[in-house]
Amino acid sequence: MRIASFASLASSTLLLATALTGCGGKSLVNIDGPEAFLRVVNTASAGQSIDVLVLGSVVVPALAAGSVSAVVGLPAGQQAVAFRPTGSSGPAIGTSVTFAAGDTTTLLAVDSNSVINPWVLTDTGKTVAAGRSKLRVVHFAASAPAVLFFRTQPDFPSPTSVMFPFAYRNASPYLESTPGDWTVLMASARYSSLGRPIVGDTLFFTGKIAVPAGTARTVLFMDVPGGGFRTVVLTP
């Protein structure tokens, strides 16, 4: 087993994508009635930039691989959303997504049979009690082998398993602690003849993730085009 010490690993670059609310969202389509909000993370493993279309109009142009869009406004209700490789003139196949008025919906761009599809990242359990903090882990690193995730949290500094098993495109429940710094480590895994997990090499370590009182964070693991892994940290 070769898990590097949490204390000895250098902190990675964390991209903090804070959802805008109310008038902070920029509306790029005509809105007649209640407004909802959309944010997109390009996790597609092909490493290409994408255009995001809602109601047939491009609302997010040229979103680079591994990046998070700004929050944009759109009509609440059921809307057709499509992802298209930037520069492509072909038709974009839409997926119906329901947007709740006043809420921000996060969509992940994922590859499926050479088509880039929207994947809705639900946020059940994001409400945080006063004086507490929450964090969850989402696994969209397509090139990773079988993995295990461990976290430290403000009230328990020893590495603890996030969830088992933890397959690609899975999300953990929100974990709760006191306010302060969390960390997350992704390690390769293999299994004994009895099916018990054996921890292997460290694949990625986030460094400290500050989660203030009354707030939640989502740590999203994804591929880096050309090899390796990265994370983005999302605020609901």
Image (cartoon, rainbow, N blue to C red):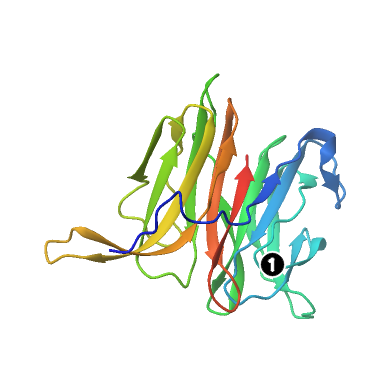
Element marked by disc 1: strand
User: Up-down: is 22 above or below 208?
Assistant: above
Which residue is drawn at the image coordinates 63% and 49% (left, top)? 106
223 displayed left or right of 96: left
> In the picture, which quadrant includes the N terminus?
bottom left
Q: Can you give x and y, in whole percent of width and height, for residue 81 in the image?
A: 69, 59
> Furthest-top residue in view?
130
- The amino acid sitting under disc 1 is Phe
User: Up-down: is 56 above or below 76?
Assistant: below
Residue toward you, 41 or 148: 148
165 displayed left or right of 103: left
User: Up-down: is 218 above or below 146?
Assistant: above
19 displayed left or right of 56: left
> In the picture, which quadrant includes the C terminus?
top right
Which residue is drawn at the image coordinates 50% and 40% (left, top)? 182
User: Up-down: is 158 above or below 178?
Assistant: below
Q: Report whether residue 173 is seen.
A: no
